[in-house]
Image (cartoon, grey):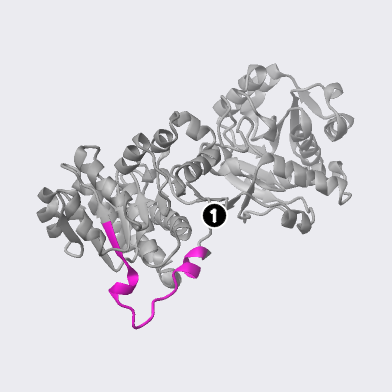
């Protein structure tokens, strides 16, 4: 049964194929039956989202994805819709269940369009159904396939993609030269991890899901490498405070950074830490910033730090350290980072500290690294494009190379724990957050959660989710023009999960 409620487990293509194989070979479900169920789920999605549609063009490729499309065409035609099919592969060249499905459409004497006919009539259709390439794309789309996808995207017509938008790499979320921009994607058996990060969300549109009625035992036996973060984690890890709570029990966060002209970054990180519940928040920064910060933020303790000796005294009094916001890459920043790295305190490392670390790598451990793709590329000594080509591998490489809990920011931010060997993906957040200072706020939230006793892994997971959810709250007033400080009120609400029902 199709559902808009998505599972939290995400899979790689080879895992979904294995589950499909087990369902067929070990549980006796014919492949053609699964194909019929997939077609029914796609038809249900069509009726749910475009109930008034009458004229449908189904674009069928080779393989089982095309087979799903042919059987969809059969069901839609039987329901009285005006259905035409573009067959990108001759039926005689198809094999197995896909050929049987194509023959079912031919036996109905269903309409078959040529490429030229599709190009001329695509604009008169109500909905286009993409059953072209499926999950097997490994190289850039070319030739007639590229031309067809261009027509689809330029048509302005609603698009329903079967299993995954054609041209989108299912494991990575990378567009292989060109991809269909779907309005709705129906995903089968297991959700493909590529739909949730990189370019995946942009091209997948709204995701709906159908498990094709395969036995639950198959899911139980297949370990998912990636899990979508759930808001339930917040309440479990941040219960209501006890009545005798005092600030000393909630940790002391120290923010190290703010070279000349860069005091804003440390103020944002410190504010994020304060709003996320740290008992005490201090800033170690250039002397010239002291008066302004103290005037703007009387709740924060600001310390003038011009040397390593100044910082060493402060490090003896804190629970967790943020290093990097506005740190710069001068000798001053390098000296302060060196001192911080020598402590045994948990660290949250961002911005210029990551750039300095890339130039002089260490495997310190007991820290959280929070790079955006450009910083991740420097840390891994590669191009940003390589990081983005496989964000899942990149976040694992960061964690392994630096012995860290790694947060790879971006569309579908990822958190990887070396201890658990698992990736968590944040599906919250929005493009309005692509503005200065957002990363500084995030470091503050993560550090505050560590200060309050959460493990580095849990602090990273929950911090990313709280930060993104606060960003979605702020976006209710519009994404354009959003500022980092707009998140602070939402952060406070989200870390008080017990009270959420009162303000929703």
- Locate residue 351 relative to residue 2 in the image: left or right: left
Residue 249 at x, y percent in the picture: 33, 73
- Please say if 491 is above or below 91: below
- Mark 1, residue position: 419
Residue 67 at x, y percent in the picture: 79, 34
Q: Is residue 347 visible?
A: yes
| Camera-nearest residue between 349 and 409 | 349
Q: Which residues are drawn in magenta?
A: 233-254
- Please say if 139 is above or below 162: above
Give residue 104's quadrant in the image. Answer: top right
Q: Residue at x 72, y 32 (%)?
A: 58
* Quarter of the figure that contains the N terminus: bottom right
Q: Is residue 53 visible?
A: no
Give residue 177's quadrant in the image. Answer: top right
* Quarter of the figure that contains the C terminus: bottom left
| Camera-nearest residue between 374 and 177 | 374
Q: Residue at x 58, y 37 (%)?
A: 172
Query: Is residue 245 in the magenta section?
Result: yes
- Locate residue 149 relative to residue 273 in the image: left or right: right
Residue 402 at x, y percent in the picture: 44, 44
Residue sitting at the far bottom? 244
* Count of all numbered marks drawn on residues in the image: 1
Q: Residue at x 28, y 46 (%)?
A: 338
Q: Secondary structure at mark 1?
A: loop
- Locate residue 28 relative to residue 489 in the image: left or right: right
Query: Is residue 190 in the magenta section?
Result: no
Give residue 186's quadrant in the image. Answer: top right
């Amino acid at each position: 049964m199709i559902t808009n409620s998505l599972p939290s487990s995400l899979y790689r293509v080879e895992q979904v194929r294995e589950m499909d194989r087990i369902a067929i070979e070990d549980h006796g479900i014919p492949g053609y039956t699964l194909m019929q169920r997939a077609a029914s789920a796609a038809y249900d999605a069509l009726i749910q989202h475009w109930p008034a549609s009458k004229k449908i063009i189904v674009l069928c490729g080779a393989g089982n994805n095309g087979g799903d499309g042919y059987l969809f065409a059969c069901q839609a035609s039987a329901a009285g819709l005006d259905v035409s099919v573009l067959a990108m592969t001759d039926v005689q060249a198809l094999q197995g269940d896909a050929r049987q499905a194509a023959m079912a459409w031919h036996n109905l004497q269903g309409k078959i369009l040529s490429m030229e006919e599709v190009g001329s009539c695509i604009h008169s259709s109500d909905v286009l159904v993409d059953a072209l390439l499926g999950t097997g794309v490994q190289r850039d789309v070319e030739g007639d396939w590229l031309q067809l996808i261009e027509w689809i995207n330029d048509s302005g017509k609603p698009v329903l993609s079967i299993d995954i938008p054609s041209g989108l790499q299912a494991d990575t979320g990378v567009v292989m030269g060109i991809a269909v921009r779907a309005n709705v994607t129906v995903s089968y058996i297991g959700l493909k991890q590529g739909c949730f990060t990189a370019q995946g969300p942009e091209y997948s549109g709204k995701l709906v899901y159908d498990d094709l009625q395969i036995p639950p035992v198959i899911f139980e036996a297949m370990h998912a490498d990636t899990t979508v973060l759930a808001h339930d984690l917040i309440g479990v890890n941040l219960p209501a405070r006890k009545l005798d709570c005092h600030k000393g029990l909630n940790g002391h966060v120290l923010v190290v950074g703010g070279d000349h002209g860069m005091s804003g970054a440390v103020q944002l990180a410190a504010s994020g830490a304060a709003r996320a519940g740290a008992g005490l928040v201090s800033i170690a920064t250039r002397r010239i910033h002291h008066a302004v910060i103290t005037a703007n933020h009387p709740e924060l303790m600001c310390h003038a730090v011009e040397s390593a000796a100044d910082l060493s005294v402060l490090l003896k009094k804190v629970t967790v350290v943020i290093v990097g916001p506005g740190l710069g890459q001068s000798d001053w920043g390098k000296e302060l980072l060196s001192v911080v790295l020598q402590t045994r305190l948990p660290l949250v490392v961002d911005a210029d500290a990551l750039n300095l670390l890339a130039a002089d790598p260490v495997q310190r451990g007991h820290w959280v690294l929070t790079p955006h793709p450009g910083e991740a590329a420097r840390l891994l000594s590669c191009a940003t494009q390589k990081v983005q080509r496989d964000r899942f591998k990149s976040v694992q490489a960061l964690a392994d190379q630096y012995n860290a809990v790694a947060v790879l920011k971006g569309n579908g931010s990822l958190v990887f724990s070396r201890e658990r060997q698992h990736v968590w993906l944040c599906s919250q957040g929005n493009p309005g957050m692509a503005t200065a200072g957002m990363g500084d706020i995030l470091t503050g939230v993560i550090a505050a959660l560590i200060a309050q006793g959460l493990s580095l892994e849990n602090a990273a997971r929950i911090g990313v989710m709280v930060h993104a959810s606060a960003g979605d709250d702020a976006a209710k007033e519009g994404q354009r023009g959003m500022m980092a400080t707009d998140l602070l009120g939402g952060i406070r609400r989200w870390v008080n999960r017990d009270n959420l029902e009162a303000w929703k």
